[in-house]
Image: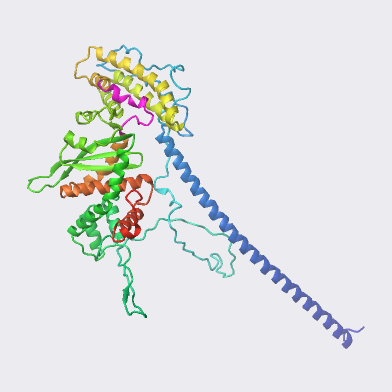
Amino acid sequence: MAPSDPAAVLAENTRLRAERDGAFRQLAELNATLAKLADTVAGQNDRLDQVVAMLRRREAQLRRLEAENRKLRRDLGLPAEDAEDEPDPDDPPPAGPSAHSSSTTAPDAPTGRKDTSSSPSSMPSGKGKRPRTRGGRRPPPPHLPEDVERVPACACGRCGSDRVLKKDVLVSRKYDVVPSYVRCRTIEREIVVCADCGGRTTAEMPPMPWERSLFTSRFLAWLVVMKFVLLVPLDRIRRLLLSQGVDLAESTLVHLIAKAAQLADAVDGEHWKQLLAGSYLCFDGTGLKALVLGQSKAWDGYLEVFTRDALTVFQFDLTKHADRLEGRLRRFHGTMVCDAETRNRSQRRADRPIANCNAHPRRKFRDAEVAQPTLAAQGGRFLQAIYGLEARAQADGLRGDALQAFRRRWIGRVLRRFRTWLELVVKRPLPPSDPVRKAARYYLNHYEGLTAFVDDPSLPLDNNASEREFQHHAKLRLQSLFAGSPEGAHRWATLLGVVRTAQKVGVDVLAYLTWLFDRRGTHRDGFGLSAAEL
């Protein structure tokens, strides 16, 4: 067939057209397959993003649990999990040279040999290695509210092409802040007219702290939190409000604090009733200056704290007289855990025994190591062993009769050896002003109160629970210097007690106070809640 044959050319053209159509069909099928693959990849990327987010949440929870574990181990006196083996707490540290102490060790002092007959099989090993922290590089905690900001990548960074496929998402969590601000709450109450009788009815006002109040319960709660939780003085709160264009006189803020204390007074009184009804309470006191009308300078008042478990109550008085304390405790028939002041010892009754604080003699022996390193360290090791055994019992979850049996068996044995050592120290030819001699005599003079916890499993070893309450008060006192009046000091005590109890229970103080003020304010009768229910 000749190349110029028209029939052959037509046939070749038809064949080429068929091949072209087939190629286009294959290309369309490939494009459809590619689109399906792109959809599949996009779906897989979305699922991968969800898995990555879930893993990050689990990792944050794990880090938080590890931090709580480390904190609990430190609180219980246990070593870190990665710490090396450390010596037994009963083993004495190497004795340093002393020009004032005798080279002879008093009999029955704890020695470097482990006495398996007089101590549990395992003891807390003292301070473990503290885990390394990341300082300011800790990521934001997972419980913070998140504002997600998505930043798309629309083009290739290398060639500039806009045909890109999503492969992964790089997540960075940063600290951010939303400035707090005061806002106006506008309440629009409808007024309706009855179609039957023509009477006018106005919608009821929402709960307010008091009638015709210009401030909501949340504002009142915010003010209390700023002063008694964040420790911001009222003059600084006033400047903060002024920076937002809200000009409130400081006397107005004082009036609001007084109103808040009045609303919270019944709850504080209920806490006091529950404290008096318990088997024991921890007690301590410290100073609080207050301005008194007619006095040329601030009056040295006295702030007392009473606490047990999650309950905390503060009481203010202008004097430190024992009869005032007796009047407060006349309905209390439990054990007072306090230091050995004369004022406190006078409160001892047949139905109100006194248990003293073992932290005081422990500090006395520690301070005495400056003058008598060897001898004071021996006494400190006895108390360290007692605290170590108690930490072991608490870590094992012992309560009631089991805790009492543990204390009598193990701590009682250490106390008997300790008392023998104390009596020998007192008989030594030491000057009356020697700090070790004074510490030993202190423990012997108050031995009954210092060892009362052995027979009563509900009692703690020391009074640190009440002393820790004053840490927050001391910072507040440093910021405020003094109370403006005795009444202001009483409000100070009321609100600080309610706030500290809420913090120890673990509730949000701002939310709780808002809830409390709503139910103690204008709608008190409608809610019908007693102080015990609040």
- The x, y position of residue 190, in whole percent, is 34, 74
Quadrant hosting residue 430: top left
- The x, y position of residue 400, in whole percent, is 42, 30
Q: Residue at x 20, y 55 (%)?
A: 254
Q: 344 or 12: which is nearer to us? A: 344
Q: Is residue 48 left or right of residue 309?
A: right
In the rendered image, the residue lying farthest to the bottom is: 6
Q: Which residue is drawn at 45% across and 42% down?
A: 67
Question: Quadrant of the image for the N terminus?
Answer: bottom right
In the rendered image, the residue lying farthest to the right is: 1
Relative to residue 278, is residue 492 depicted above or below? below
Q: 86 or 363: which is nearer to us? A: 363
- The x, y position of residue 513, in whole percent, is 32, 54
**What segment is highlighted magenta in the picture?**
445-463
- Is 451 included in the stretch rendered in magenta? yes
Q: Is residue 5 left or right of residue 121?
A: right
Q: In this view, does 4 lie to the left or right of 291?
A: right
Q: Which residue is drawn at 26% across and 25% down?
A: 364
Q: Is residue 131 left or right of residue 96?
A: right
Quadrant hosting residue 46: bottom right
